[in-house]
Amino acid sequence: MQKIVIFIILSAKATYIGKATASKKSAIKNLCDVNSTVNIAQLLSAIGYGFLRTSATEMEDDGNIQTMKQRGFQLINPTEKWFPGIDVLRHEFSSWEGIVGKTPTFSVEKELALKTEVNNKIECRRRKRFNGRYQHCDA
């Protein structure tokens, strides 16, 4: 049931107004629905070998020939011990300013038909920071 609700929410039609490049819709699929034996280790390995088979300058799959030219790959541990300063970056990118503050101004418009035979338009806008306080774009 949750998959159906998520699909409906993600596929809802709306008008996006902004200066950013338009996003392209992609299929929504749970990997376990396609292959019930999939696991994280296999997935990471498949993605890693996909990168090893692909030349950085020519985005083509060169198979084992390109893989043999590479030096393999190693999973890393993204911790402060391995990468000093990564905790500061993680905090910055997960903060309100890192997520919303760097998002270009945009608005979303969607018309909703209500049972009372009244059509309403709901407009949501990103909030902007002004004099240290967040305000709606309209303010």
Image: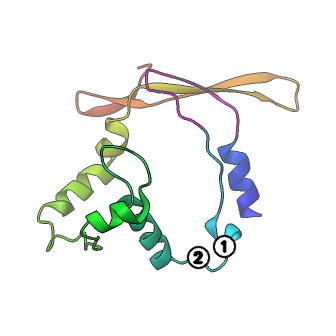
2 relative to 57 in the view: left or right = right
What amino acid type should be assigned to the residue bearing mark 2?
Val
In the picture, the quarter occupied by the N terminus is bottom right
Q: Position of residue 7 (x, y in %)?
A: 71, 51
Residue 54: horizontal and vertical position, in percent? 38, 54
In the rendered image, the residue lying farthest to the front is 65
Q: Are marks 1 and 2 in contact (CB under 8 Å)?
A: yes
Task: Please say if 79 is above or below 58.
Answer: below
Identified by mark 1, the residue type is Asn
Magenta run includes residue 134: no
Q: Which residues are magenta?
A: 12-24
Near mark 1 (Cα within 10 A), the count class, few <14, some 14-19 or many ≥20, is few
In this rendering, is residue 86 above or below 122?
below
> Principal SS element in the magenta part?
loop
Q: Quadrant of residue 59?
A: top left
The residue at 70%/38% (across/down) is: 12
- x 19%, y 61%: residue: 86
53 or 127: which is nearer to us?
A: 53
The quadrant where residue 33 appears: bottom right
- With 136 as the anchor, is 6 left or right in this view? right
Residue identifier under label 1:
35
Q: Gap in Å between the C-alphas at discs 1 and 2?
A: 6 Å
The quadrant of the image that shows the C terminus is top left
Foreground pick, 59 / 112: 59
Q: Which residue is mark 2?
A: 38
Q: Position of residue 68 (x, y in %)?
A: 31, 68
The answer to whether 2 appears left or right of 40 in the picture is right
Q: In the image shown, does 59 or 68 lie closer to the viewer?
A: 68
The numbered disc on residue 3 is none
Helix, strand or loop at label 1? It is loop
Residue 19 falls in image quadrant: top left
